[in-house]
């Protein structure tokens, strides 16, 4: 669509967004474009203009509607999306709608950037986004169980590149990356992929109302059938999360019990743990609550990597003998019934003692979808130094 600017108003009487040719050929389309799409939908506060631009640009790229990209990239810049974020949307969608669409989008966006004297774009030097460890362990476990037997390479690339690299890039906030992903999945008619990404989106801060509004917005850009096909899938996700839908009682009025499964649990990811570690009974509270946690079992000598928590963490020691250390401090020994309160942003590690295993229940709140920032592993030398200090 032609972007409404002082230069285009003379061609679009009355400040219309639709070009004059639309009124000459399809006056009804002109009416719905100006009065409904831009006169009503784009002005709704349920989804801010910046988010609507993310959704629209994602839909155009993923469906190959390249003739419309330039005007909406300009609108996106006007709505507060940064040039590097637009570049990262293209990068992200290469994985979700294919390299040809992404490469074609680059050519169109470069024309806009050249006109506005933007670029070249450089990769961000910000710290990489650390994904929540227990959720990643569950996701990787599912990929290894259901994808690897048929396509080992696809499983390996999913774990190493898609989630081990792309989803950790700081050029897009987790919430925005989830919004773009959901928009693309609805746009290309892949509702079976929505449950995982809708849950991930809500964990990353998108609300039920915002997701519903995005689905409605997409109806104008990818057609009503694809938006309507997404609705029952999203409804099941909201219901499963205990969100309030229709005449259903409010989630806070419901009692929910997650029964213990004796054989449940996944191995702690090698990137974040040393030794034999098992993560089980993971939970995540429903929005607007941000709290989550899990039971973590460490064999003797096993421990976490160095890490911090944006909103802090609380550990309850269930059994065994454990060690915890903050950076620059001495190792503290903990046992059954002890509670460890870890302040926000304090660099630390915790795990079992050198001679006995340990089980703790960990609880933390998420900030912008992230409850932990992982760093380098605790080396054997650092751990032995702690052992020496205990003797």
Image: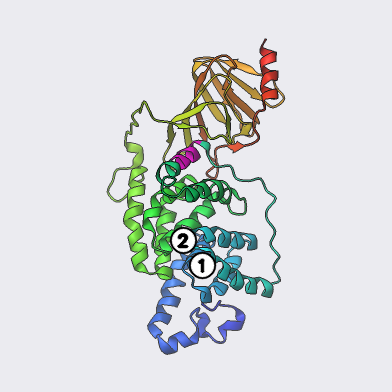
Q: How far separated are the C-alphas under marks 1 and 2? A: 8 Å
Height in image: 146 above or below 220? above
Find out whether the residues at labels 1 and 2 contact each other: C-beta distance under 8 Å: yes
Q: What is the x, y in percent for residue 42?
A: 47, 67
Residue found farthest to the top: 391
**Quarter of the figure that contains the C terminus:** top right
Residue found farthest to the bottom: 24
Q: Main secondary structure of the magenta part?
A: helix
Q: Nearer the viewer, residue 30 or 84?
A: 84
Q: Tell me the magenta residue range.
A: 134-141
Q: What is the x, y in percent for residue 50?
A: 54, 61
1 or 2: tag closer to the N-terminus: 1
Q: Is residue 9 left or right of residue 33?
A: right
Height in image: 385 above or below 73? above
Q: Dot 2: within a 10 Å radius of its alpha carbon, few (fewer than 14), some, or many (20 or more) residues?
A: many
Q: What is the x, y in percent for residue 270?
A: 56, 34
Which secondary structure lies at badge 1? helix
Pointer 2 residue: 184
């Amino acid at each position: 669509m032609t972007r409404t600017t002082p230069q285009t108003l003379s061609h679009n009487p009355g400040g219309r967004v639709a070009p004059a040719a639309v009124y000459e050929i399809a006056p009804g389309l002109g009416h719905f474009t100006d009065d409904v799409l831009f006169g009503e939908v784009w002005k709704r506060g349920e989804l801010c203009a910046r988010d609507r631009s993310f959704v629209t640009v994602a839909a155009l790229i993923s469906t190959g509607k390249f003739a419309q990209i330039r005007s909406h990239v300009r609108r996106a810049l006007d709505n507060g999306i940064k040039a590097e974020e637009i570049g990262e949307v293209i990068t992200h969608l290469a994985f979700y709608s294919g390299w040809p669409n992404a490469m074609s989008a680059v050519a169109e966006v470069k024309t806009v950037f050249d006109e506005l004297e933007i670029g070249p774009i450089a990769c961000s030097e910000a710290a990489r986004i650390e994904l929540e460890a227990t959720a990643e362990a569950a996701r990787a476990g599912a990929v290894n169980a259901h994808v690897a037997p048929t396509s080992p390479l696809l499983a390996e690339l999913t774990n190493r590149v898609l989630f081990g690299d792309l989803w950790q890039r700081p050029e897009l906030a987790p919430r925005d990356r989830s919004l773009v992903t959901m928009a693309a999945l609805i746009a290309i008619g892949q509702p079976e992929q929505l449950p995982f990404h809708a849950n991930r989106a809500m964990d990353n801060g998108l609300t039920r109302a915002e997701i519903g509004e995005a689905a409605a917005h997409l109806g104008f850009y990818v057609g009503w059938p694809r938006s309507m096909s997404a609705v029952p899938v999203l409804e099941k996700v909201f219901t499963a999360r205990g969100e309030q839908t229709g005449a259903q009682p409010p989630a806070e009025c419901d009692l929910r019990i997650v029964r213990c499964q004796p054989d449940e649990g996944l191995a702690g990811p090698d990137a974040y743990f040393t030794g034999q570690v098992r993560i089980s009974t993971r939970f995540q509270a429903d929005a607007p609550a941000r709290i989550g946690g899990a039971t973590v079992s460490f064999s003797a000598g096993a421990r976490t990597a160095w890490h911090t928590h944006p909103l802090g963490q609380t550990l309850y020691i269930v059994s065994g003998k454990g060690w915890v250390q903050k950076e620059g401090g001495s190792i503290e020994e903990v046992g059954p019934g002890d509670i460890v309160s870890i302040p926000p942003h304090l660099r630390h590690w915790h795990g079992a003692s050198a001679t006995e295993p340990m089980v703790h229940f960990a609880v933390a709140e998420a900030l912008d979808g992230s409850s932990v920032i992982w760093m380098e592993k605790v080396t054997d030398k650092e751990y032995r130094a702690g052992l020496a200090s205990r003797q």
